[in-house]
Image (cartoon, rainbow, N blue to C red):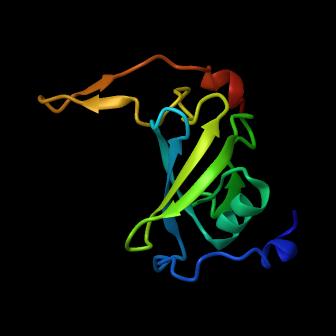
Amino acid sequence: MNAESNERIPIPSQIAWDAAGLVPAIVQDAETGDVLMMAWMDEPALRNTIATGFTHFYSRSRKRSWKKGESSGHVQRVESIAVDCDADVLLIKARQEGGACHEGYRSCFFRLVKPDGSLEIQGTPVFDPEAVYKP
């Protein structure tokens, strides 16, 4: 779908975009309830998500919108999008194919903070990032 036709996709006017025109989006596994990732959305990313049924986000480092899984094939099929009470965070329930994390894990939240301040890795990778993200 091209950007011109996506401009007609309605989005809630109540969304409180930040000064950079972004809103945080938390992606939750629709089946397990596990939090998979957090990323930023701009208006085009939200419109593309609604239009296609696949998550799209805005990369602050690359300064462009992108489709989750565009290079890895690990897409997220959207089941629902909710807005929090302040309208400044989105919660997307999705069905994840493969891993959500670019480090190879199903969830980006695979490290737990221990009482001593160290990090403990939970779980095992579901894919090899070096094989997926070839230079």
Q: Is residue 5 left or right of residue 49?
A: right
Q: Residue furthest left?
A: 116
In-front residue for pair 120/26 = 26
Residue at image coords 40%, 29%: 110
Residue at image coords 52%, 19%: 125
Vertical position of residue 78 compared to residue 36: above or below: below
Vertical position of residue 8 compared to residue 76: above or below: below
Locate residue 62: give its quadrant.
bottom right
Q: Residue 122: x, y in percent?
A: 37, 21
In-front residue for pair 55/39 = 55
In-front residue for pair 15/30 = 30
| Picture quarter with the C terminus | top right
Q: Is residue 48 left or right of residue 104?
A: right
Q: Residue 114: x, y in percent?
A: 19, 28
Locate residue 123: give its quadrant.
top left
Q: Residue 129: x, y in percent?
A: 61, 26
Q: Is residue 107 left or right of residue 41?
A: left
